[in-house]
Image: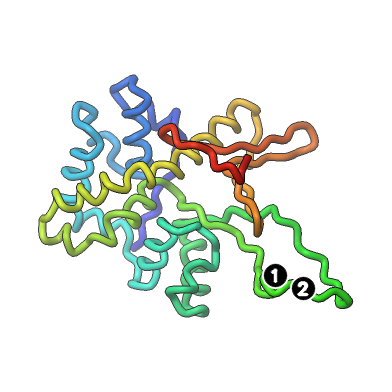
Amino acid sequence: MLLKRKNINFNHFAKFCNTSALAKIFDFYSVFEGFESLDSLNFEEDVFENIEYLLLKNYLHIKDYFKLDETASYALSLLAKNNRKRFSINRKIQHFKALSTLKYLLRAGIIKLEHSKEAKRIKDKRQKLKKELRSYVIQDKIIFANHFTRFFFYFLKPNEKLILQNRYEEVLGLIKEKFELYQSFCFEQLSRELLEKKFQVSGVQSYWDKNLELDLYYKDDEISFIGEVKFKNKKICRNIL
């Protein structure tokens, strides 16, 4: 049986934390939001020690949360790391198999769609499309239902062999190497949550089209804004400005 993980917001998660250090709370939130045993978290230790004791050393139990076939697991590992576009997994998984897999994962509530705001091009038979536009398809993006699920398929499932061989230090080294990169999207999602709370709106998302990607986008009849989110003092690219 596939267990659905509950999504909780940052403020709710923080209530489980016996620390007031926001950076530490965010570290735990980016990994354990959606984890069923929040009471077992040890905030006297850092997030990596918790990952080792709660996840790596209990991997056989943890993996039972996600009883998926090989194709679904592979698709989630791809989506955890790539640009999240709906058809991005078609490069690695046969088209019809990828389509049925995504439909199953959406129905199961493991992932959800972030719908594109890009306007569809109006076709004009008298005007010949440029070569680079002929195969271009507007795509929705994929969001994991919670951070714990994405963390599992970003780091744990791809390194399952190492974990089962008890090579925990090696796995932790791989996690630490990519941890800030992984966290950057968690921070982007948290920024959306903050803006929704501040402006009393819902539906803040990212914006993307063929030529541009923005981390934050919202528009209604009364308010609109766009924004870029940079984690750990990373600079905004000039083309965005």
The N terminus sits in image quarter: bottom left
Q: Position of residue 207 (x, y in %)?
A: 63, 48
Q: Residue at x 60, y 59 (%)?
A: 140
Q: Residue at x 46, y 79 (%)?
A: 94
The residue identified by callout 2 is 129
Q: Label 1: how many residues lie within 10 Å, few (<14), some (14-19) or many (20+)?
A: few
- SS at mark 1? helix
Residue 11, numbered label: none
Q: Is residue 144 left or right of residue 218?
A: left
- Toward the front, the furthest residue is 238
Instruction: Estimate the x, y position of residue 9 in percent, counting from the top left.
Output: 46, 35
Residue lying at 59% horizontally and 31% vertically, measured from the top left: 195
Q: Which residue is mark 1?
A: 133
Disc 1 to disc 2: CB gap under 8 Å? yes
Disc 1 to disc 2, C-alpha distance: 6 Å
List x then y, in percent, for residue 214. Answer: 60, 45
**What amino acid type is highlighted by mark number 2?**
Leu
